[in-house]
Amino acid sequence: MTSAPPEFAAAREPCEPEGWFLVAGAAAAALYLAGTFVFAKDISELTFLAAALCCVAAVATFADLRTARAGVALALGGVLLGCTAALGVALLPLARHRARSWALLRAACEGPTLVAGSAAVGATALGTAAGALLGGAAGAAELPQTLALCLVLAGVAGAATACAYFAKYAPDAGRSLGVDLNYNGVKAFCVLAGAVLGAMTAAGALVAALKLHGLARGPALHVPGRNSFALVAFGALVVLGALFVLPPDTTGLIYAHLLCGAILVAAGLGSLLVVGCAVQDMAVCLALLSGLAGWTLVAEGFALDNLLLTIVGCLVGVIGGLQVRVLGRAANRTLSAVLLAHPKPLTVVAETTASIAAATGLEAGLLDPRLSRTQTTSVEAVAETLAEARQVVVVPGFGLSIAGAQWALSAVVLALLKREVEVHVALHPNAGRLPGHMHVVLAEAGVPTSIVRAIEVEGPHDINQDVNQIFAQADVALVVGAHDLTNSAAVEDPNSALAGKPVLHVWKAKNCVFLRHHTQMDNNNPVYAKENVSVLLGDPKHSLEALNIHVQSHSLI
């Protein structure tokens, strides 16, 4: 985890008193427990509704970075209230025994009611502690794999809940499923959907976490016949699901086998789809898995008749779907292309190499892969250009987070703002490995949210032109870790594999500076061959720290 330097300890913008949302949530939870245990009144449904409304209101605050922290606190208050209501459902029988007599209460405490209540309280406390430790240990750079691990837990919980519900209503292998306790076809479908979606989410998120954490090396794993296996697995799920949901004509044990088979097939399908995705497509994968986790909650909510799970699940599922659409348009790729298409890095390199050759007048076969014609510059020259500029556009990418250079970048931005330089931070939707990832990274470093401008995808091959028009007016465009989002071949070469991909037009600035470790390009980018583009070699963090010193010293001249 990357900690903030002392000088940035208080470098945060004022925000709304989000702590009061937590206090209100805790107070509401205490009132609910008092009403449940003291007066033995079941108000869980009303409490679930209040918790769901808190989550819905929290999502509305995420549209503005200035209120996002308050939204997080409001969501936490809603989750706290929902968890308390779930505990109240388990403790309600004890409360009713207490209302009758202390003797009945003592008798209930000796039975399974106390065991179930204690298990619920213990599991909630354990989960809260584990979540606090996991969240506290993870920095902004580790947010993608942290979310992936949370999705693993969400998927496992969804599948386990479905299996527990099945075991409750079909405990006897000799009974037919659907005979007892109104366990009908709709309930059976909800149980199956919750188990299948949960298993698929857990397996896919586990593979994504391993790839994001670097434990699964390589951009993408090519599995021979992967699409055929996926099609067969999908067909198997349809068959198993139909047998599970159709009117029962066999014993509960057979249905248990069908459910377990569906879970295994779903887990295999989820891991198979994600394992073939490149790391740069993990943002789309995580958005899809988040949506699946949401629909898992919806299925569980219908099965358990739980209003909170249904509403929050719909919210998460729809948001995940919208994120997949936006990120896909920003990458100029469809969801099927991300999940099912084989990686073709050689084709992209060959086509962009031809683009560079056309831009430089060289033959493609004679082009140096290290782009030796790229202009290099020095820290002193870049610092002087920044200090004398009137308008600067900073373009950060995931490489900034990997290098841990967000604090150094924030120092440079603040130094320029002190010189009354107009500074903009342009973000691409695919800048991080997570939707909104770079917003969190920059906010953690204390970059003013008022200067951050994110691209809004308006069409399949279009982006907000107002953001790109800034570059034409800018004196300097400073690119840190976002070279894959500034490939000019997407705009200038209609025959390129990247043609139509929304990119940031950094080459339109008077001066464009890329901060890179070396000139070896992962995807040969013709923008480096332009006359107004130069590369500052070295560790981005060290380069930014040096730029900050030189910019501040230049202000004294």
Image (cartoon, rainbow, N blue to C red):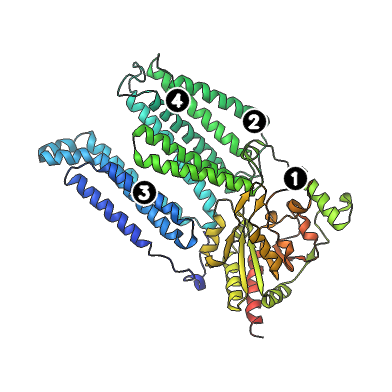
Q: Of helix, strand and loop, which one carries label 4?
A: helix
Element at label 3: helix
Give, as a three-letter code, the residue at label 2: Asn
Name the residue beneath numbered marker 3.
53
Question: Residue 337, how many percent across, how many down?
Answer: 65, 39
Sooner in the amino-acid sequence: mark 1 or mark 4: 4
Quadrant location of the C terminus?
Answer: bottom right
The three-letter code of the residue at mark 1 reads Ala
- x then y, percent, for residue 136: 44, 56
How far apart in space, not on screen, are marks 1 and 4 (Cα)? Answer: 43 Å
Q: What amino acid is at disc 3?
A: Leu
Instruction: List the residue tagged with mark 4.
Output: 259
Distance of label 4 from label 3 (alpha carbons): 33 Å
Q: Are marks 1 and 3 in contact (CB under 8 Å)?
A: no
Location of mark 2 (residue) = 227
Q: Residues within 10 Å of mark 4 (few under 14, many from 20)?
A: many
Which circle, 2 or 1, is nearer the viewer? 1
